[in-house]
Amino acid sequence: MVTNSIEKILATGEVGATITVKGWIRSKRESKGFAFVDVNDGSCMANIQVVIAQTVPDYANQIKRLSTGASVEFQGNLVESPAKGQRVELQAAALEIFGESDPETYPLQKKRHSFEFLREIGHLRPRTNTLGAVFRVRNACAAAVHQFFQEKSFLWVHTPIISASDCEGAGEMFNVTTLNPDKLPRTSDGKVDYSQDFFGRQAFLSVSGQLEAEIMAMAFSNVYTFGPTFRAENSNTSRHLAEFWMIEPEMAFCNLQGDMNLAEEFLKYVFKYVMEKCLPDMEFFQQRIDDSVLATAENIISNDFARLTYTEAIEILKKTDRQFEYPVSWGLDLQSEHERYLAEEVFKKPTILTDYPVEIKAFYMRLNDDGKTVAAMDILAPKIGEIIGGSQREERLDVLESRIAAQGLNLQDYWWYLDLRRYGTVPHAGFGLGFERLVQFMTGMTNIRDVIPFPRAPLTVEF
RNA sequence: UCCUCGAUAGCUCAGUGGUAGAGCAAUCGGCUGUUAACCGAUCGGUCGCAAGUUCGAAUCUUGCUCGGGGAGCCA
């Protein structure tokens, strides 16, 4: 007798086999002489139907305890199901109840719940159909990320979670300290004396692993990071988290073209992988969440992304009849409405914009020969907006120094980053991808807090 | 942080100044190879919190808290 996953039993279980099933009860339908119980173990969307006849020992008492949410083990024969709805079902001969679930207080019903309510019971929501599908797809995405880069011989590098400097200037950071906030040591000018702190200086949770990834790329050529990052921004939106996972490949001897090609190939690969591994879950999203997810996946996999420069995009936005709330003018950053218009209405597919004005992009992006633009690229996805941001990095020491100075940053803070240009510098490029946004894009889930098991956001840290 | 909408039974919601409602869930019973099962009955409320207006407030006013959507910041 073997315990198999319900996914395996439903797909390939042989009629007549004696099997064991373990899982949690999703619903019970009681009759006079017998009962049906749906059991789910998380291995797939579908439940296995278990038929419990009165011949089961202590039937009346046991049936009462088999309520929604209870954890159980059933043993019996797998039989062909005489009714529609399932190929096979389990005819229970014996059962064991590991943990009961009081139906008067168990908050999950068979009926649909709002995602807002499910966020309040973050410890139980993984047991629902939708969140179950989300986390299976999330897992498949993560596996696809590693498989894609490993097949290309990229090195997975572990960049630090605690970091000393706001290297990218990517927003507010969380402090990491062991100082007692009730008794902060002060310097003579009244500021907090971080020389007495754990690291001897101020430290933060990392907002990006990019600069460290560049260090590793200068030794291993092609690397990628895949790990958590942190932003202390007071962002209250359906697209932002305080703790999220980021993927950042970095390639030595690579320019912006190569960077774009890799990003496009990457997205196609991940979508294809998930469509192959999680089709039932994707079909569930199509049916219950967003009826465009399958078409979107197909669109990503089989069409080339649109590619144009920022300057060309500005021309398109200026020519359209569409009225925008924010002005369009060369030199201004694009607003959400502009990005969505381009990706959703003009091109109707992922759209890569390149060569942004130098003033609106980060210091490390490579200055183009025109002196006005940098070798940056953003991939705009319909409905999600910016899903990937990348660039060719500035490899010329003198240009990088003047860019850092121009942004009012302190050269000393970047001494090791500048050393990379001092010793064996090479053209290199990379991009960053918010993992949760990828999962959102793939599943059609509208709120980013529902695609990560334990969301961290302002006032949100309970589970 | 800004704009906007909201908070009433375990859940989803109705109720615009005069005795607190429905569907679902739960409980009990019935019936049926059921599958969002079905039928009947029962149970279920500090109407987010605080103050104010009024003879009387779930309802009107103010403040606060929390949540949704949008924006900014960004991934």
Image (cartoon, coloured by chain):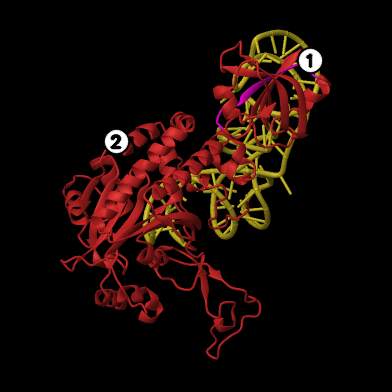
In the rendered structure, are the residues bearing label 1 and label 2 in contact, judged by CB atoms less than 8 Å apart? no
Q: Is residue A14 left or right of residue A398?
A: right
B25 up-or-down from A222: above or below: above
Query: In the image shown, does A226 or A3 lie closer to the viewer?
Result: A3
Check residue A54 in the rendering and tell me which mark sits there, or answer none: 1
Residue B32 % position (x, y): 69, 8
The total of numbered circles placed on residues is 2
Residue A97 % position (x, y): 77, 31
Query: For the residue marked with disc 2, what is the amino acid?
Result: Ser
Residue range in magenta is: A44-56
Check residue A219 in the rendering and tell me which mark sits there, or answer none: none
Gap between marks 1 and 2 measured at Cα: 55 Å
A267 up-or-down from A77: above or below: below
Residue B3 % position (x, y): 42, 54
Residue A143 % position (x, y): 47, 44
A184 up-or-down from B26: above or below: below
What shade has chain A been given?
Answer: red
Q: Secondary structure at mark 1?
A: loop
Query: In the image shown, does B3 or A295 lie closer to the viewer?
Result: A295
Name which of mark 1 and mark 2 comes first in the sequence.
Answer: 1
What shade has chain B been given?
Answer: yellow
Label 2 crowd bin: few (<14), some (14–19), many (20+), radius 10 Å = few
Q: Is residue A72 left or right of residue A425?
A: right
Question: In the image, what residue occupies the spot 20% across and 60% down?
Answer: A330
Check residue A302 in the rendering and tell me which mark sits there, or answer none: 2
